[in-house]
Structure formats: C-alpha cells, structure tokens
Amino acid sequence: MEVEFSKENFLLPEVKYEYLDHTADVQIHGWGTSLKEAFEQCGVAMFGYMTELDYVSVEHCFEIQAQGDDLEGLLFHFLDELLFLFSAEPYLVCKKLEITKFDLETFEISCRCYGEPFELGKHPQGTEVKAITYSAMQIVQNTDASNYEVFVIIDI
C-alpha cells in the first residue's frame, strides 16, 4: 500500500552490509546496533544486488507487513515481501527501509519502503533474485556490545 511521506530532512542511513561469496548463490551480511537496523540493512542489500542504488531516487513510499513463527521465519517473510514489491507492480526498488513495527513477541514487522519503480535505461540491471532461502540463515545477537548481524543466502 502506498503511503504519503515528506522529502524534507530525508536522510539515507549508513551502509552496513556486504556480499559474501557462496556456491551458485550470494550471501547477504547485514549488521547494525539493533536487530531492527540489521534487518533493514539486509533488505536494502538485496535491492543493491538487483541494481545500483546510486541511480535510485526516493519518489514513492510503500508499506509492507510480514509475520513469522520465529525470528528466522520473520526475516525470511520480511525479505520475501520486499522481493514481491520488486517482482510485481509497482516494481519498487528500495533505497531506504524503515521498520516502524518490530514485535519480537508476535514476530510481526511493518516497514516503510522508500524508492521508485525499476526502469530499464535508468537503473542498471544487476542480478535477478529468484528467492529467499533458509539455507545457512543466521541471526547473531550480541546485546552487550549492541552488535546485531544477519546472514541470508538469496537464490540468484
């Protein structure tokens, strides 16, 4: 669902992700000072693998919801919802994700997704992401050091 937003004082977060080699696929490693930030970074990393985010403008904001049975299921369904946002209308490429609800008791997420529709000619074509996988999925929480990391293999 598209929602209104203001471009005033709109800031993009620091990049806190990397791509790790994996046989025939790619592993996304996202991190942050909170688990919410690590999830957001992982989602943006997936879009960054599909196109170069430097070419993406923030023109629209859509809101998605995801729910899981546990933390890994929540991460899987969150990324799957983001992939659907790209794969079907509006074909949105997200440059920023802002999780507005992150409930670890009911395993629910609401997220605002900022970006614009993918357009050949404007956005370089990266690698198509076919699916999210549970394979080797890791969620590392070091609460004492405020260090949270997620590792997800995406099927390309």
Image (cartoon, rainbow, N blue to C red):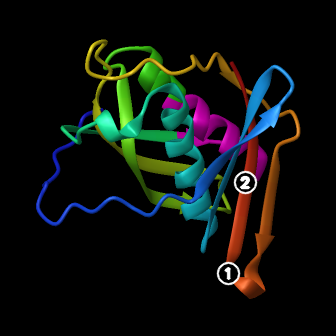
Image spot of residue 131 (x, y percent): 67, 21
For residue 59, above or below residue 119:
below
Q: Amino acid at mark 1?
A: Ser
Highlighted magenta segment, given as a residue range: 66-82
Query: Position of 133 compared to 37: left or right?
Result: right
73 in magenta: yes
Within 10 Å of disc 1 (Cα), the crowding (few <14, some 14-19, many 20+) is: few
For this orientation, the residue located farthest to the bottom is 144
Q: Secondary structure at mark 1?
A: loop
50 in magenta: no
Q: Amino acid at mark 2?
A: Val
Query: Position of 96 compared to 58: left or right?
Result: right
On the question of residue 60 being in view, the answer is yes
Residue at 23% in and 42% down? 58
Residue at 81% in and 19% down? 24
Image spot of residue 89 (x, y percent): 34, 15
Mark 2 — residue?
Answer: 150
Please tell me whether the stretch drawn in magenta is mainly helix, strand or loop: helix
Label 1 with label 2: CB-CB less than 8 Å: no
Query: Position of 113 compared to 14: left or right?
Result: left
Within 10 Å of disc 2 (Cα), the crowding (few <14, some 14-19, many 20+) is: many
Residue nearest the viewer, comparing 63 with 90: 90
Q: Which quadrant: the C terminus? A: top right
Image spot of residue 151 (x, y percent): 76, 48
Residue nearest the viewer, comparing 51 with 7: 51
Residue at 37% in and 30% down? 93
Q: Quadrant of residue 28?
A: top right
Query: Position of 34 compared to 3: left or right?
Result: right
Determine which of the numbered discs, if any, sits on residue 66 in the image.
none
Mark 1 — residue?
Answer: 146
Q: Secondary structure at mark 2?
A: strand
